[in-house]
Amino acid sequence: MKIIGKVHHMQEFFVALTSYSFLQHALVAGILASVAAGLVGTFVVVKRISLISGGIAHSILGGMGIAYYLGFSPTKGAVVSALVAAMIIGLVSLRARQHEDTVIGALWAVGMALGVLFISRTPGYNVDLMTFLFGNILLVSTEELILIGVLDGTIVLIMALFYKQFLAVSFDEQHARLRGMPVEFLYLLLLILIALTIVILIKIVGLILVIALLTLPPAIANHHASNLIHMMLLAVGLSLIFNAAGLVVSYQLDLPTGATIVLIAGAFYLLSLVSHRFDGPTRLRQSK
């Protein structure tokens, strides 16, 4: 009987999916987010720059709040503030690494404070701050979906054009310098891609949970992939599964979608971690 009930609930979801545009938008947004998160998140995990990514993510709230206060789309404000934060953190990391943690912490705190301040002072204030902090994939509008699609396409294009350079910088930065590669430019470009990916993911899971969705699928993939290409493809596939499963479960149980997605991803990460310890490490190699 339980199995029949589950099948019935699944049928209800798919019927709703064909009937309601907000569910269709949510599914498409989840697919686009999965591609960006899988590709870019792989480099975040490999280069171990989750802290930098977190600094970029949390500073974005300031740009979103200012944009909303001025009557613009918060997503567009997020794009601008994410790019600015990525450049500031990137330049500090390159030029004054000893101050990197301090600058990240300052941007993190000031960005969040500015966002809360401007959102609270917006005339006719009617926005739930929780939407910015924890996201709501079910509220993705057509305009936002188009912007997410443009950002996603930009990320995929740049990743395809500079994949070999990113690969070299990630695994052997010193050798890349000796080969005459513009290492600093590539590092800043990678941070820009991270910033754009974070903007996409914010609508899915919000600022608080964005780093989890950016790093958990690649971290799981890292346990099972033998080279970077496999890791990226597996990370994209896992992101798709987590987003789709989170959407279905949250719809059926009336739960927050972003939190549900991250909990599913976290559960799979713990299972993968345990399995990885028993099976032994997988050596990640450079892809040719």
Image (cartoon, helix red, strand yellow):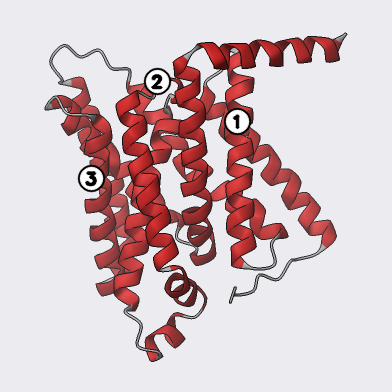
Mark 3–mark 2 Cα distance, whole angstroms, equals 22 Å
Q: Earlier in the sequence, mark 3 or mark 2?
A: 3
Residue position for label 3: 81
Disc 1 element: helix
Q: Earlier in the sequence, mark 3 or mark 1?
A: 3
Q: Nearer the viewer, mark 3 or mark 1?
A: 1
Amino acid residing under circle 3: Ser
**Where does label 2 land, which residue?**
139
Q: Position of residue 272 (x, y in %)?
A: 73, 49
Instruction: State the residue at coordinates (31%, 79%).
Output: 182
* For residue 46, above or below residue 149: below
Q: Give the x, y percent position of residue 18.
A: 55, 15
Quarter occupied by the N terminus? top right
Of residue 141 and residue 278, the one placed in the foreground of this image is: 141
Q: Amino acid at mark 2?
A: Leu
The amino acid marked with disc number 1 is: Ala
Q: Residue 44: percent from the left, percent from the top?
A: 48, 58
Q: CA distance from mark 2 to mark 1?
A: 16 Å
Asked if residue 112 shows in the view, the reply is no
Q: Is residue 256 left or right of residue 90?
A: right
Q: Against 234, is 182 above or below?
A: below
Q: Give me the C-alpha separation between circle 3 and circle 1.
A: 29 Å
Read off the residue under disc 1.
244
Observer able to see residue 233: yes
Left or right, 256 with respect to 271, comes to: left
- Please rate how many residues cluster around mark 1, counting C-alpha atoms within 10 Å: few if below 14, some from 14 to 19, many from 20: some
In the rendered view of the protein, which quadrant contains the C terminus? bottom right
